[in-house]
Image (tube, helix red, strand yellow):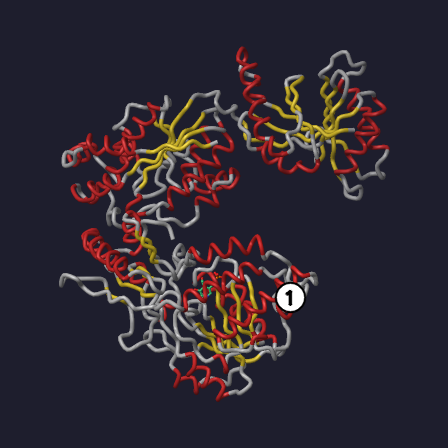
Amino acid sequence: MREGIVYLDHAATSPVCAEVAEHLARDLVELGWNTGTRYELGLTARKALDVCREQVAHYLGCETDAVIFTSGGTESNNIGLRACCGQLPGGGVLWNSATTHPSLAGPVETLDSQWEVVPMPVGPWGAVDVDGLAELPTPDVVVLEWVNNEVGLVQPVDDIAAAAVAANPEVCILVDGAQGVGKLPLPDMASLTVFTFVGHKIAAPAGIGGMMLKPSLKLTPLTRGGGQERGWRPGTVPLPLIRAFCNALEHITALEAAPFGFESFDGGDVPAPIQDPGGSYSPCITLLNVAPVEGEVLQHHLEEAGIFLGTGSACSSAKKSLSPIHKAIGMDAKASRCTVRWSTFPGQDPAELDQAWRVLVKQWRELKRFF
Amino acid sequence: MTGMWIIRYAEIALKGGNRAFFEHALLRDIKRRLTGCGAPAVTRTHGRLWVADDPRHREQVRRELLLLPGIQSISLAQKCANDMQTLKTRGLEIFRAAWSGDEPARFRITTRRADKRYPMRSEEVSRELGAHILQNAPDGLLSVSLGDPELNLHVEIHGEFAAIYLVVEPAAGGLPIGTGGKVMCLLSGGIDSPVAAWQMMRRGCKVHHVFFENRTFLGRGAFDKVERLSQRLAHFQGKSTLTAVPFSDIQVAIRDKCEPRNRVVLYRRFMYRIAERIMRRHRCLGLVTGENIGQVASQTLENLRAVDITVEAPVYRPLLCMDKVQIIEIARQIGTFETSIEEAQDCCSVFLPKHPETRARIENMEADEVHLDVAALEQQAIEAAESITLS
Ligand SMILES: Cc1ncc(COP(=O)(O)O)c(C=O)c1O
């Protein structure tokens, strides 16, 4: 991490940590062989790849064969949705979460008309209302995110999966795990069909991601090629990046993700987290209500102090349209503009966070007079 | 037969004694702009410039030439021997390549003899070539129309060769950049100001840029945009500068101390005065803005006057009377539109009043500025200004 800054936008991406970078630099030179070759170098690479796959399978709690490496979260979500829906060529019913990341919402939107997409009911804070699921038509596919990237909300994945399986034991369930992997205790993989993840959210480089994909699925890949990754993601396997992912995973799981308090340190007014007091949230992502100050103005003032945090989601913060999760929790355009997203990395220095919080509060108080 | 671009520059030709200077500037610009398109040979003869055609780069060369100030029009011609037999064969070939042969068409031949020693007069060449084309076409489909032809086959006869072409494409016109002196443009990141800069460049001016940046409130996104816009403009004009002037403190001071309704006009008075001082450093002869009467509620004649009065330098407003659709059309042509419409915070609700003044009175503005330390604010901004060079 660059010296002298406080980086609080880990939900957007995390820079590669020094240990991972060091290993990667060495691997790029020493392990850059094609895992599909039969000479000794290739066999060595192939073995290293097997070790990585086992490590990820062990972390996820799934079969080794189920682990597929891809280029990232977007690709995993696209492959995953194609895999789930591809099992039913005649279409069916898809239970959808209205608050997913565009990399999942996008492919769901472009499904053909044979698919009936029904939104899962949600409570006032965006969490899926599990009891309400009984009212929906029997699902063939269920699509949801585990941890929301904008507000940090954790969906009750196990309960949703149980409800779906109860309705249809053959159901395919796709869960986007991008924001939770390495940071929270995992949901149960046993009832999931696809579970996606991405490296750059855990301080591996961008360009590597992956997924758990049940080996029993009929092959319906997005791209065709040389058959690597069981044919789901053909293309020469980027072993050094996969090793970097595994290193980063090992590194992050050894760290503790502790929630930050956002408390007043002087009895004065401070921005409040936008959270259901009884809800379940990631300790790494908090949306703060900075009204009446516009989030972007606060962001730029903090930037001058070397503190970097996001407004909304990195992917949509330049757009003027309201994000689905903001809408789901009842915010209007103005309320949505008056937020910043504070997102941390497990193990981030509490003193650094405290200092950043004090600066944020001070800036916020000074800026209030402008609004 | 080889392909050649014919480049015409009527306006320069009018410039009498300075002709060599203008031609030289144009030649230099063409060579510079075409280095990325295979650097074709450029030659100067018979009051035109000639650029060798290479089909692999043709479209790119066309795009560059059409947007090169100083060029009146261009034609992609075929060069061949100038004896009558060759003119007939090649002329027919070129004509047939453009005409399907099964639709009726009106045509004419336009011959121009640059070499007066050529044994036939222009009309004779046209007549003979026209007759040849008619003979070789199915009966009754082609007719000659001198006044309203659909296809006009041009034949230019030069000393050792002829050039034949069908199409004359109008280009940007104007004068080669740098032949008209230097100006400084207030660039904002919107659609208009890059077009204003381009209009000045099209008339031969070299344009430097100044940008007023509220980084504290809006971040670096707007500067990034302006930098890319001025980089795009540098594609046309070569080396130029972009000066970013920090503007947060001035906006905060105006917001805190002056009448809300006066804010927008006061911001612009500061911008003009600061731009004028920066302009002097760069030895520019005037300021350029993208202002346009009535485009936004605050761009009224009264407001323009209340701003204009603050500087001695002439302020050029090439878009003053243009319509938005025209401006957008030019922005698309010069390739700034897409960047201009990218979303970036370029003004903040914090600084905009609910009811901006539309009929500013100079006395009121001056009276309001008394609440500010104008000289100190301007001095600080100028000292903290940073310039970058674009090329
Ligand atoms: C919840 C979620 N899913 C998927 C992605 C997509 O990851 P990527 O942009 O690396 O493909 C992200 C990150 O932006 C995310 O936050």
Along the line of sight, the residue nearer the viewer: B265 or A39: A39
Q: Is residue A94 visible?
A: no
Which residue position holds label 1? A228
Numbered disc 1: what chain? A
User: Split into 4 quadrants, where in the image is the C terminus of chain A?
Assistant: bottom left
Q: Secondary structure at mark 1?
A: loop
Q: Nearer the viewer, residue B56 or B336?
A: B56
Residue B74 rendering spot, x and y as whole percentages: 63, 29
For disc 1, does the CB lie below 8 Å from ligand 1? no
Q: Is residue B38 above or below residue A96?
A: above
Q: Where is residue A240 shown, x and y percent of the image?
A: 55, 58
Determine whether A270 is above or below B344 in the image.
below
**What's under tag 1, amino acid-wise?**
Gln
Residue at the image position 32 percent from the left and 27 percent from the top: B278
CA neighbours of label 1 inside 10 A, class few (<14), some (14 to 19), many (20+): some
Tell me residue B125's x, y (percent): 79, 21
> Which of the pair B89/B206 is nearer the observer?
B206
Residue A158 appears anywhere in the view:
yes
Quarter of the figure with residue A236? bottom right
All told, the count of numbered labels is 1
State whether residue A360 is above or below residue B102.
below
Q: Residue at x 55, y 78 (%)?
A: A63
